Image (spheres, coloured by chain):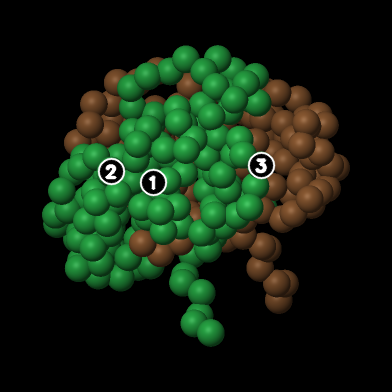
Chain colours: A brown, B green
């Protein structure tokens, strides 16, 4: 197995609402795709949105499930101010505030928001090391 | 918000078992880190393993939850044979077989396995376009 995650797919209740949140609210780049799915061509692993029942059906498992999904997605940024900016952008786009950004026990600064389906995103500044994909060089 | 997911964190019941599965079973590169967490420095978004209760606590939510998490992770490869190889590697490492690899409705070839905590991975070959991070150039 190569060391990569190609895509993270979120099973959503309302594809239009979720797509609006990620494309218009958060500004993520969406690829042309069939109407039943939304692909976001991120720098690193891609993000996909798909109906929750359809996703479970694709895997052949029951769609039943509730409570904490057990998975969180992190968006790391280069400064504490950038954490505040992204948290504000997400809340303006309709995200739920889960944990206001604050200093963390590990020396960083982070907050959490929930997307329209309740999936948890951590917005974090880690002053110790950079995590995940680097930004593409400009131009 | 920049178009990237920095890290995906899986909340696990047994960190040692989950770390063994991903590091030794699947061969993912693990970074030196404190004993309560495991970071895998993937090509693209990183993967982290953290105790399920600790993860929920970090976000300030209840750890209660059951059934389908609603999220799947995809590992795309360059051929149908490579799908079979990765599925076999995962099963040999102790993964659960969720859906044997087969032709898909969208013209690809894919199967699903479950990690020790039940998180679903799709192993897929998409002949239409490459998804997610490219392999680093050799050398």
**Residue A29, image x, y percentages:** 55, 55
User: Is B10 displayed left or right of A113 in the figure?
Assistant: left
Quarter that holds the N terminus of chain A:
bottom left
Would you name the residue on which mark 2 appears? Answer: B95
Q: In the figure, B107 relative to B53: above or below?
A: below
Q: Chain of mark 3?
A: B
Q: In the figure, B48 relative to A42: above or below?
A: above
Callout 2 touching callout 3 (CB < 8 Å): no
Give the number of the mark in front: 2 or 3.
3
* Residue A119 showing in the rendered view: no
Q: Chain of mark 1?
A: B
**Residue B56, image x, y percentages:** 57, 23
Q: Which mark is residue B34?
A: 3
Q: Secondary structure at mark 1?
A: helix
Quarter that holds the C terminus of chain A:
bottom right
Please tell me which residue is depicted at 72% across the width and 55% down the height of the picture: A130
User: Is B130 displayed left or right of B34 in the figure?
Assistant: left
Would you name the residue on which mark 1 appears? Answer: B21
Structural crowding at the residue carrying mark 2, measured as other residues with C-alpha within 10 Å and reported as few (<14), some (14–19) or many (≥20): many
Q: Secondary structure at mark 2?
A: loop
């Amino acid at each position: 197995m190569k060391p990569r995650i190609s895509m993270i797919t979120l099973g959503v209740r309302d594809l239009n609402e979720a797509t609006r949140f990620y494309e218009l609210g958060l500004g993520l780049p969406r690829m042309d795709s069939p109407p039943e799915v939304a692909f976001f061509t991120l720098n690193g692993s891609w993000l996909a949105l798909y109906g929750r029942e359809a996703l479970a059906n694709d895997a052949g498992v029951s769609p039943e499930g509730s409570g904490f999904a057990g998975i969180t997605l992190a968006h790391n940024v280069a400064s504490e101010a950038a954490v505040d900016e992204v948290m504000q952008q997400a809340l303006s786009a309709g995200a739920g505030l889960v944990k206001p950004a604050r200093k963390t026990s590990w020396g960083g600064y982070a907050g959490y928001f929930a997307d329209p389906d309740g999936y948890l995103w951590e917005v974090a500044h880690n002053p110790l090391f950079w995590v995940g994909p680097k930004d593409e060089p400009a131009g």
